Amino acid sequence: MRPVACDKPRASVPALAQDRRKYFRAFPRFALKVKVRVQYSSGLEQVELTGTTADIGLGGLGATLRAPLISKERVWLQFIVPGVPEPLRILSKLRHLDNGHYGFQFLSTTTEEREAIRKSCEKLPPA
């Protein structure tokens, strides 16, 4: 039996997955533009990069950095959210990089940090 040709071309699965990732997130994102510090250990050296956040949600944040981040290992993100006087310092992982925009996933947040982020997001516009 020969395969039947379809009238419509099929979209590739990776392209569909990429489109879905852009529009469906586990947590909504909100616009937040504050300074961020990224710290990690590279062998014997402690590396610190700085940049600016673009958006934040309960599960992570997006940022641009002044220097490229090469490591996909765990990093510490330090940043301030509105309404919280002290910077948050959260263990995170680089999940994606798109044209200089870094997407970080929070790996561990305390109840207090999560509540501070949630309250801040209530005051921020959607991203």
Image (spheres, grey):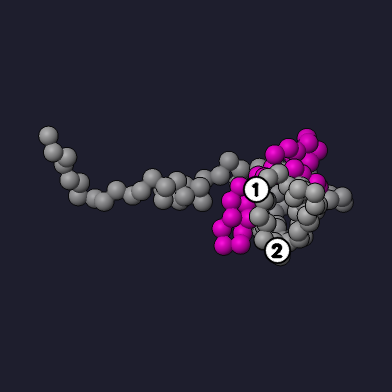
Q: Name the side, left or right, on which 110 lies relative to 25.
A: right
Q: Which residue is drawn at 45% across and 51% down?
A: 19
Q: Where is residue 41 in the image (x, y as percent from the top left)?
A: 77, 48
Please name the residue shown 45% across and 46% down the image: 17
Residue 94 is inside the magenta segment: yes
Q: Give the range drawn in magenta.
A: 88-114
CA–CA distance between discs 1 and 2?
Answer: 15 Å
The residue sitting at the right extreme is 85
Tags 1 and 2 touching, CB below 8 Å: no
Query: Picture quarter containing residue 126?
Result: bottom right
Secondary structure beneath disc 2? Answer: loop
Answer whether residue 97 is visible to the viewer in this image: yes
Task: Decide whether the magenta segment is chiefly helix, strand or loop.
Answer: strand
At label 1, the amino acid type is Lys
Residue 1 location, x and y as percent? 12, 34
Q: Which of 112 and 124 is in front in this view?
A: 112
Left or right of 110 on screen, residue 27 = left
Give the percent coordinates (x, y) of residue 122. Answer: 70, 48
- Image location (x, y in percent) of residue 60: 67, 46
What residue is pinned by disc 2? 67
Is residue 37 visible in this depiction of the protein?
no
- Residue at label 1? 72
Residue closer to the observer: 21 or 40: 40
Amino acid at pointer 2:
Ala
